[in-house]
Image (cartoon, grey):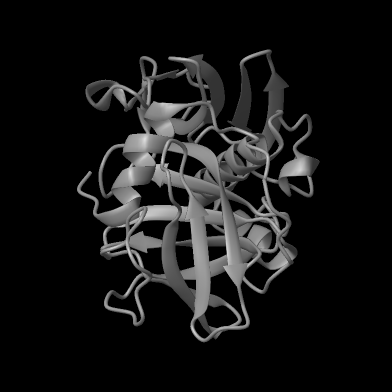
Amino acid sequence: MKTIGWMSGLIGVVLISQSVMALPTTEAVQPSSIAGRWQGTFNDKYPMSFLFSPEGKLVMVFGMNGAEPTVLAGTTVNYKVDATTKPMHLDITIPDAKEPVLTIADLPDPQTLQIQMSDTNPGKPRPTKFTDQTKMQKVSDRAIEPLDAAKFTQAAQSSEAEGRIVMQALAQSALFSTVESGKFPTTLEELGLPTNNTANYRYQLQTQPKQITIIARPKKANLKSYISVVVTGTERKIDFATTTVCQSIRPSLFAPPLPRLGSPFAPNDSRAVCGIGSEAVKF
């Protein structure tokens, strides 16, 4: 994945330098209007999502294998924002960097966040104007993307799409929740799913010490089945979390085999390996 500025620093430093999950903040941060979960693309190509907590923790989730990723990886850093300036001053603390990344941010409207990403690195002067078009749209006020009545009804009306849409949302919310809190969610309700039993699917969440598994089993013989895992681990004394979703290649009433997730530390192994008879779903 081609990145520039502090984005490459995040992937190259945060995921390879030290443990950052549930990293404690060192300074009090006032709640700001940028708090919440945001989603967009970097360079109009690479998916990324940020969760700014009011306490100064920033959860960052990136696709690990290109512009149409099948694996997402998440970690946390600290941030500080000064909303009294225009544009806002945003400081991001990256592990092992002696100085923070100094950049600027703006809210063109309450649902849109613009962040200057190009030409920003630890120790570099803060930019004074926006030179790139990186904008993110607000997804939720918290880690979980609620599957509200309108969205869930829309997904359920398209029986073929329901499993994929719901499982993608559940996997991403589970990843954000796990990275933010340092522990796995234990119920589907925690992930914003109002019911685990729809006209088309039965949904199930299973917890284990190092991973959770989410399954969507269809009730109709003409629908595909789905499975997702969120995995945490420690490598080189680093904590990390990753997720993927696999679907059956053909309609099936049975869940696909458990997928295997490669390590985010190994670029050539950062993809999902779905079991026989299944394939990875693009986020």
Relative vertical location of residue 176 with respect to residue 125 in this rendering, above or below: above
- Quarter in which the N terminus is drawn: top left
Q: Percent from the top left, x then y, of residue 187?
A: 78, 33
Which quadrant of the figure has residue 84?
Answer: bottom right
Relative vertical location of residue 203 with respect to residue 55 in this rendering, above or below: above
Q: Percent from the top left, x then y, of residue 22?
A: 65, 35
Q: From where the camera sits, is residue 178 visible?
A: yes
**At x 50% / y 47%, what residue is drawn?**
60
Q: Nearer the viewer, residue 103 or 142?
A: 103
Relative vertical location of residue 172 with respect to residue 263 in this rendering, above or below: below
Which quadrant of the figure has residue 20?
Answer: top right
**At x 59% / y 32%, what residue is drawn?**
21
Relative vertical location of residue 127 with respect to residue 45 in this rendering, above or below: below
**At x 44% / y 32%, what residue is drawn?**
247
Q: Percent from the top left, x then y, of residue 194?
A: 79, 49
Q: Percent from the top left, x then y, of residue 118?
A: 27, 65
Q: Nearer the viewer, residue 219 or 152?
A: 152
Q: From where the camera sits, is residue 254 visible?
A: no
